[in-house]
Image (tube, rainbow, N blue to C red):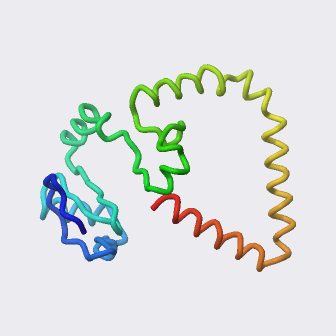
């Protein structure tokens, strides 16, 4: 793990690469409650290399979510997802800010109106039908299903890590 320039909330010591993934008990809320008793109402832990912060006090959670919501609204973007999303210029991966507000407003006013959704309904229905037919056709070939699943898993892991 690299050294941070900012101070993190206390939390359990992570293992290299794995983080605290094996420290989390099956009943997660109880695990976080126990950690809050040891480390305080704000604690940090890692799932793999991802830093996570838990706020276990209602008043602190309100302050974080109401007063600092815009600081926390951005999504994590890996190098591969940044290239895929034109460095966050699309709606799904855009950081919260003027660009996101403008794109979302355009979608709300132009793309997601009832009239536009009804006009595009036949296209959506055709695509769903084609997808179901493709799945049914591939269901007779187990090797094809496994291959598609493996390809999807590899692509997903590269996009979202």
Determine whether 105 is above or below 22 in the image.
Answer: above
Determine whether 59 is above or below 53 in the image.
Answer: above
Q: Quadrant of residue 67?
A: top left
Q: Quadrant of residue 106?
A: top right
Name the residue rendered at 15%, 52% in the picture.
6
Instruction: Give the quarter of the figure containing the C terminus.
Output: bottom left
Q: Quadrant of residue 20?
A: bottom left
- Closest to the observer: 142 or 105? 105
- Closest to the observer: 11 or 88? 88
Q: Position of residue 63 (x, y in %)?
A: 21, 36
Q: Position of residue 154 (x, y in %)?
A: 58, 69
Instruction: Give the quarter of the figure containing the N terminus.
Output: bottom left
Residue 82 appears left or right of 48: right
Name the residue rendered at 87%, 66% in the picture.
137
Name the residue rendered at 53%, 41% in the picture.
92
Q: Position of residue 42 (x, y in %)?
A: 18, 52
Determine whether 134 is above or below 66 in the image.
Answer: below
Name the residue rendered at 83%, 69% in the picture.
138
Residue 19 appears left or right of 42: right
């Amino acid at each position: 793990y690299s050294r941070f320039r900012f101070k993190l909330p206390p939390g359990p010591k992570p293992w290299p690469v794995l983080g605290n993934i094996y420290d989390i008990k099956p009943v997660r809320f109880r695990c976080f409650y126990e950690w809050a008793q040891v480390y305080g109402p704000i604690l940090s832990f890692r799932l793999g290399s991802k830093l996570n912060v838990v706020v276990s006090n209602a008043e602190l959670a309100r302050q974080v979510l109401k007063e600092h919501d815009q600081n926390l609204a951005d999504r994590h973007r890996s190098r591969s997802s940044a290239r895929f999303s034109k460095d966050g210029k699309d709606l799904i991966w855009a950081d919260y800010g003027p660009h996101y507000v403008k794109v979302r407003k355009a979608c709300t006013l132009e793309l997601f109106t009832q009239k536009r959704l009804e006009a595009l309904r036949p296209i959506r229905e055709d695509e769903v039908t084609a997808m179901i037919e493709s799945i049914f056709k591939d269901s007779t070939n187990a090797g094809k299903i496994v291959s598609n699943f493996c390809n999807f898993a590899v692509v997903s892991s590269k996009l979202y890590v």
